[in-house]
Amino acid sequence: MHLLFATSIVPDGALASGYEIANAAIIAALRRAGARVTVIGFTWPGEPAADPENTIVLGAVDVRTESASPLQKLAWVARAVLSGLTFASVKLRVVSDAEVRAAVERAGPFDGYVLNSVQFAGAFEKLFGDRPSIFVAHNVEHRSAQENAAAAGSAFQRLLFRREARLLETMEERLCRRARFVFTLAGEDRAALGVATDDRSVVLPLVTRADAPAGTGQRRRIECDAALIGTWTWQPNRIGLDWFLDKVVPHLRRDFRIRIAGGMPSGITSTHPGVEFVGRVPDAQAFVRTGAVIPLISTAGSGVQLKTIETFELGLPSVATSRSLRGIDHRPDNCVVTDDPVVFAAALEVAASAVRDVDGGAFHRRQVKALDAAIRLGMNKLGPVRQEVFA
């Protein structure tokens, strides 16, 4: 079976975001199930595709809102309003339908599409009705847009997010209805998308790496009490960080050391003397391993939290909100779950004072086995799986 994996940004091997980590895991699982997978989409500027022989590149785009100029943001808004597309999808309309169709035809004979999230599928929606498809819902995007609107700092932002939510809800309904099968990354997303039956969807348990990390459960060098890393410019992550800094951190003792890595939007501060913003780090895994405990602080959004999965794979102690565990059926016994900020702070102090790592290999193996079973179920909905022969 030959599948065309249609996505906004093709893998470049960097795995710099949760979206890219999820894509790598899904593509690898499709190939383990016997499919030939050709990826089509855009690259980041200056970043070549990691697997050029099996990738069709439509061009290079930078879709990051936080690094765009005010003029570029205004242009995106104007084009979105004039075209009726979402803000996220209009960023990808740098090539025409005809150019995308020609690129699809260059892929050669194939059996179906894997439409990876709403951004690319929404930008070129009319092109993907000629073959059966699987839709991969990384999140319930319209719910995230509604939450972003509620947390927006200005009336203009609220208006834009409400528009996104309205368009995304309609688009997600269409993509799910047309798909032979839907993959979600969290169980509650199935109901939110209207596909909560076993003949319509399944949850994909994800992993953040091909193999279980070596050395989990072994002694490590602790440099701070708590370590957090994330793309904080993404609004759902920003909402969780604001909750942590405003509601949890004030209840921590003054000498509790917290290091926060990753791209940081303007306006993020903390009066707690132990909080340190360290910016981007060269090795995310090495960084989180320096923390005695990992706070998992999601309070908004949908889909799965890849940082939670990585923490469990590494066997690190953690304190998690209930939203941080969506899409995960099993948690290790060194993870404490609470949504109460005072209890959360107390649990962090206890975990940091008695570092208790576990072997994360068992969690990784369980996830891979469940992921492969879910992928096979979805592929069977497209038709008989023809095993591809690779040279």
Image: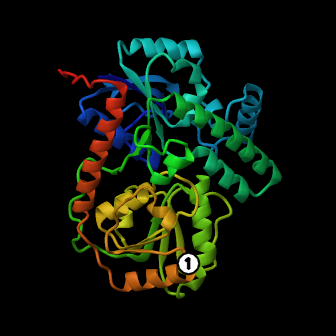
Q: Is residue 159 left or right of residue 353?
A: right
| Spot occupied by residue 112 in the image (x, y as percentages of width and height) | 39, 22
Query: How dense is the environment of label 1, judged by Cα within 10 Å: few (below 14), some, or many (20 and up)?
Result: few
Q: Is residue 170 left or right of residue 387?
A: right
Q: Amino acid at mark 1?
A: Asp
Total labels: the figure holds 1
| Spot occupied by residue 214 in the image (x, y as percentages of width and height) | 21, 60
- The residue located at (59%, 56%) in the rendering is 236
User: Residue tagged by mark 1?
Assistant: 340
**75 or 114: nearer the viewer:** 114
Q: Quadrant of the N terminus?
A: top left
**Compared to 117, does 367 lie above or below?**
below
Tell me where residue 88 sits by quadrant.
top right
**Compared to 120, does 337 lie above or below?**
below
Instruction: Give the residue at the far right of this rendering.
Output: 155
Q: Is residue 17 visible?
A: no
Q: Quadrant of the C terminus?
A: top left
Q: Is residue 141 left or right of residue 102?
A: right
Tell me where residue 306 sits by quadrant.
bottom left
- The residue located at (61%, 50%) in the rendering is 144
**Compared to 48, does 313 lie above or below?**
below
Please, what secondary structure does the residue beneath circle 1 have? loop
Q: Is residue 157 visible?
A: yes
| Spot occupied by residue 381 in the image (x, y as percentages of width and height) | 36, 30
| Spot occupied by residue 195 in the image (x, y as percentages of width and height) | 50, 41
**Compared to 109, does 182 lie above or below?**
below
- The residue located at (58%, 52%) in the rendering is 234
**Way the structure is coloured:** rainbow
